[in-house]
Image (spheres, helix red, strand yellow):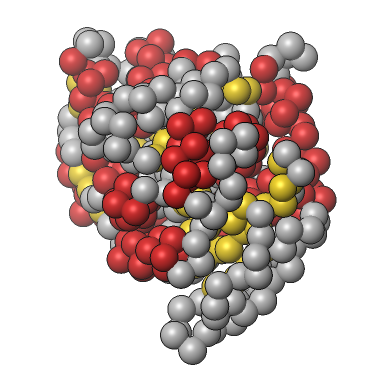
């Protein structure tokens, strides 16, 4: 599938950026100053380049689908300013600050990696602008000063569900390998929590960076422990590395992972080595396989229709739907906030933040969202299903 975005133009500052028009079709162009006045302005940061792009590009496609689905609320149009953080947390922080201070956005959405999302959230909280996170991140503090909610299933929930599946499959000795960053830490913490409940023993805590091209050394250490299964705390293309390196060493155990592995590049790069892996993920991945009365089926099929309209091809990843659900959260909250204040003002930002934290039973493609102060993740067990990779396709595995 061709990338959603053409190579974005470069402003004199050297930072690349693109603007999404308020029309149902996307129009991209150079954006070197604040955008033309719009009713509600959204700052969207993702990774269109760098080692997070296998996630960031699907996020951008999902945002295109979101705008095609609905580009106004309460009679007010929405404009999106999109920036590429190049998979660099420092760039994500600078992008967030520029979007707020120079482009005067009303809300931030992003980014593709946990480190970049954490960097954005620090700016959002400092400058008191609501943020909808698209990556699972640790959320420090539960005070009203916290201005961020997270769309994805928390790593603790994803790992709990996949750990329950490992126990059901009688996998007692499990090796862990994940990224040497916040995402890898989150998945490992979830694995250790599952171990504490009994039934599993986590044999290793091997790590690798998102830019590594091989994990042979880590694979050798894993093989030395004779695991029955491996749990992978990676994502996208790089998430396939452990199984690619373990296969030549004779690993024949089972493989498991969280939703971060549901990505077409993971399948393409991993090939036969990743066949059979079981993953905990949102129900949108198998929408057509869900019962007719399942909460996610109707909205997921609407998302797929909007995605096809915006991108010219059907969705084949698990990440674009997070952008779409973030948009549903924004639409729901903005409708309430518009009754309190006008966009572009601190009063609107505060009203929007308040409305987000009052969202109750909002059905999305990835879960049913309920936010309250101190509860920055909005989903529960209804947000997770187990899928298995069979012949290169994700299959519902209840």
Residue at 49% of width from left, 37% of height from top?
351
Residue 65 in view (yes/no):
no
Residue 32 coordinates in the image, percent (x, y): 54, 80
Residue 146 coordinates in the image, percent (x, y): 32, 38
Residue at 82% of width from left, 51% of height from top?
309
Residue 304 coordinates in the image, percent (x, y): 75, 40
| Residue closer to the observer: 347 or 209 | 347
Query: Which quadrant holds the C terminus?
Result: top right
Classify residue 319 as left or right of residue 193.
Answer: right
The quarter of the displayed image where residue 161 is located: top left
Q: Is residue 170 above or below residue 350?
A: above
Residue 58 coordinates in the image, percent (x, y): 59, 53
Classify residue 93 as left or right of residue 343.
Answer: left
Q: Is residue 345 above or below residue 89?
A: above
| Residue closer to the observer: 358 or 3 | 358
Residue at 29% of width from left, 37% of height from top?
145
Residue 35 in view (yes/no):
yes
| Residue closer to the observer: 215 or 365 | 365
Q: Is residue 297 above or below residue 214?
A: above
Query: Which quadrant holds the N terminus?
Result: bottom right
Classify residue 127 as left or right of residue 295.
Answer: left
Residue at 18% of width from left, 38% of height from top?
205
- Count the marks: 0
């Amino acid at each position: 599938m061709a990338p959603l975005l053409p190579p974005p133009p470069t402003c004199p500052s050297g930072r690349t950026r693109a603007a999404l028009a308020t029309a149902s079709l996307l129009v991209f162009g150079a954006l070197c100053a604040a955008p033309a006045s719009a009713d509600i302005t959204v700052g969207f940061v993702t990774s269109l380049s760098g080692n997070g792009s296998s996630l960031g590009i699907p996020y951008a496609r999902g945002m295109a689908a979101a705008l095609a689905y609905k580009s106004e609320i309460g009679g007010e149009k929405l404009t999106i300013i999109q920036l590429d953080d190049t998979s660099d947390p420092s760039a994500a922080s600078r992008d967030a600050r520029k979007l707020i201070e120079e482009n005067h956005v009303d809300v931030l959405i992003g980014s593709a990696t946990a480190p970049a999302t954490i960097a954005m959230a620090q700016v959002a909280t400092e400058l008191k602008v609501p943020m909808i996170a698209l990556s699972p991140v640790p959320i420090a503090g539960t005070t009203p000063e916290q201005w961020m909610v997270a769309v994805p299933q928390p790593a603790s929930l994803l790992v709990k569900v996949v750990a329950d599946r490992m126990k059901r499959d009688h996998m007692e000795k499990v090796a862990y390998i994940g990224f040497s960053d916040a995402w890898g830490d989150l998945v490992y913490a979830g694995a250790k929590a599952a171990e504490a409940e009994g039934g599993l023993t986590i044999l290793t805590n091997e790590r690798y960076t998102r830019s590594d091209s091989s994990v042979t050394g880590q694979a050798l250490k894993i093989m030395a422990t004779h695991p029955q299964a491996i749990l992978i705390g990676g994502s996208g293309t790089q998430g396939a590395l452990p199984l690619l390196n373990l296969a030549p060493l004779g690993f024949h155990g089972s493989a498991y992972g969280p939703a971060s592995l549901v990505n077409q590049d993971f399948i393409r790069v991993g090939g036969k080595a990743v066949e059979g892996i079981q993953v905990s993920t949102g129900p949108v991945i198998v929408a057509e396989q869900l019962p007719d009365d399942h909460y996610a089926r109707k909205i997921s099929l609407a998302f797929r229709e909007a995605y096809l309209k915006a991108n010219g091809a059907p969705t084949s990843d698990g990440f674009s739907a997070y952008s779409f659900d973030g948009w549903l959260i924004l639409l729901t909250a903005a409708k309430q906030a518009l009754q309190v204040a006008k966009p572009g003002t601190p009063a609107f930002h505060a009203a929007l933040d308040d409305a987000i934290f009052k969202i109750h039973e909002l059905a999305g493609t990835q879960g049913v969202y309920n936010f309250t102060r101190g509860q920055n993740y909005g989903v529960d067990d209804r947000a997770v299903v187990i899928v298995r990779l069979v012949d290169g396709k994700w299959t519902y595995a209840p």
